Amino acid sequence: VKASSFRLKTGNKNILVEMDDYGSWQADGFKLVNGDDVVVNGRVDKDFLEAKKIEAGSVYVKSINTYFYASSADEEDFH
């Protein structure tokens, strides 16, 4: 888990999840830890020379029954 991203394990694969406003979660007193069960909604972002990643619009954390949302000032388009 980093300031604006985390790795999501799905089966035997991992994918990078970026969420521009993730830092505000810590301000709310929450920090993701290894093993948290989450649901990610977003868009798969595959730039030419980068590995696939998910640009998250929202992340639901099951253990606290709470959604966290990306900043509306995010440079990615979620229409």
Image (tube, grey):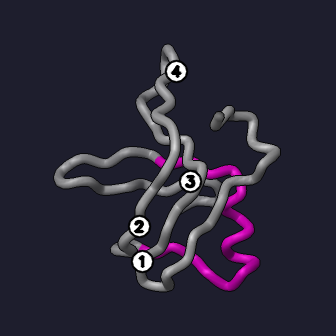
23 shown above or below 50:
below
Amino acid beneath label 1: Lys
Residue corresponding to mark 3: 5
For the residues bearing labels 2 and 1, Cβ distance under 8 angstroms: yes
Image point 36% across, 72% down: which residue? Answer: 37
Q: Which residues are magenta?
A: 17-33
What is the spatial separation of the Cα atoms under label 3 and label 1, in whole angstroms? 18 Å
Q: Residues within 10 Å of mark 3 (few under 14, many from 20)?
A: some
Disc sitting over residue 47 in the figure: 4
Image spot of residue 39 (x, y percent):
41, 62
Report whether 24 appears left or right of 60. Answer: right
Closer to the chain start, of discs 1 and 4, is 4
- The residue labelled by disc 2 is 38
Neighbourhood count class around disc 1 (C-alpha, 10 Å): few under 14, some 14–19, many 20 upward = few
Q: Which mark is residue 48?
A: none
Do the residues under discs 3 and 1 have CB atoms within 8 angstroms? no
Look at 37% across and 45% down and name the residue there.
Answer: 15
Q: In whole angstroms, how far apart are the C-alphas of marks 2 and 1? A: 6 Å
* Amino acid carrying mark 4 in the image: Asp
Mark 4 or mark 2: name the one nearer the start of the chain.
Answer: 2
Describe the element under mark 3 as helix, strand or loop: strand
Comes first in the chain, label 3 or label 1? 3
User: Would you place residue 48 above or below residue 76 in this image?
Assistant: above
Question: Of label 2 and label 1, which has the lower sequence position?
Answer: 2
